[in-house]
Image (cartoon, helix red, strand yellow):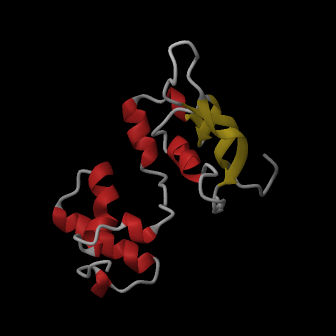
């Protein structure tokens, strides 16, 4: 690394993801859908990156691979120098505290039956052993960090 250059946070190398199709015949092998083919990119610490593309272009598939919700058919994904495929379940849970996936359809991903604070606090409940009051307080901090008032905590997203 050169002087003044930020460290590499995420490194994706030649990632491919195939999904098998249902077998149409016992005489033929099943087909595959090539969801991703040869994706490589780097994200440097302190920078943001958006993945943009048409519907069906593989954005969500790439997100699931980076979150290690699925393993790539080929290629490697490293976060802070660690190969995500090589992490133990406990190591993966710890790593997931440092990154998240942002859903592409905010209206479809927000539960209209839950107040905003519950939706914002949902990752905290999954990653931390926090009680209800602590989750609500962290949700308020999160909203404040993006310039939103705490008065929206008890509102519903409809």
Find residue 120 and report its horizontal and vertical position in percent.
33, 67
- The x, y position of residue 78, in whole percent, is 61, 38
Residue that extends furthest to the top in the rendered view of this protein: 27
| Residue 52, quarter of picture | bottom right
Q: Is any atom of residue 130 visible in this view?
A: yes
Q: Residue at x 47, y 55 (%)?
A: 100
Relative to 157, residue 47 above or below: above
Q: Residue at x 38, y 77 (%)?
A: 143
- For residue 125, which quarter of the picture? bottom left
Q: Residue at x 34, y 56 (%)?
A: 123
Task: Give the quarter of the figure containing the C terminus.
Answer: bottom left
Instruction: Please state which of residues 61 and 96 is positioned toward the viewer in this rendering.
Output: 61
* Residue 20 x/y as whole percent: 53, 29
What residue is rendered at 18% in x and 67% in y? 133
Task: From the viewer's side, name the closer residue of 52 and 144.
Answer: 52
In the drawing, does residue 125 fall left or right of residue 65? left
Of residues 47 and 114, the one drawn nearer to the viewer in this rendering: 114
């Amino acid at each position: 690394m050169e002087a003044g250059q930020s460290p590499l946070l995420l490194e994706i190398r030649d990632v491919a993801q195939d999904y098998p199709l249902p077998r149409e015949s016992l005489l033929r092998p099943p087909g595959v859908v090539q969801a991703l083919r040869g994706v490589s990119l780097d994200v440097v610490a302190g920078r943001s990156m958006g993945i943009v593309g048409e519907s069906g272009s593989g954005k969500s598939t790439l997100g699931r691979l980076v979150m290690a919700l699925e393993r790539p058919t080929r290629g490697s994904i490293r976060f802070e120098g660690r190969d995500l495929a090589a992490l133990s379940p406990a190591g993966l849970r710890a790593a997931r505290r440092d990154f998240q996936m942002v859903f592409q359809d905010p209206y479809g991903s927000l539960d209209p039956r839950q107040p905003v604070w519950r939706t914002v606090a949902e990752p905290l409940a999954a990653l931390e052993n926090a009680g209800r009051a602590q989750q609500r307080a962290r949700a308020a901090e999160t909203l404040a960090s993006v310039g939103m008032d705490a008065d929206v905590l008890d509102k519903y997203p409809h």
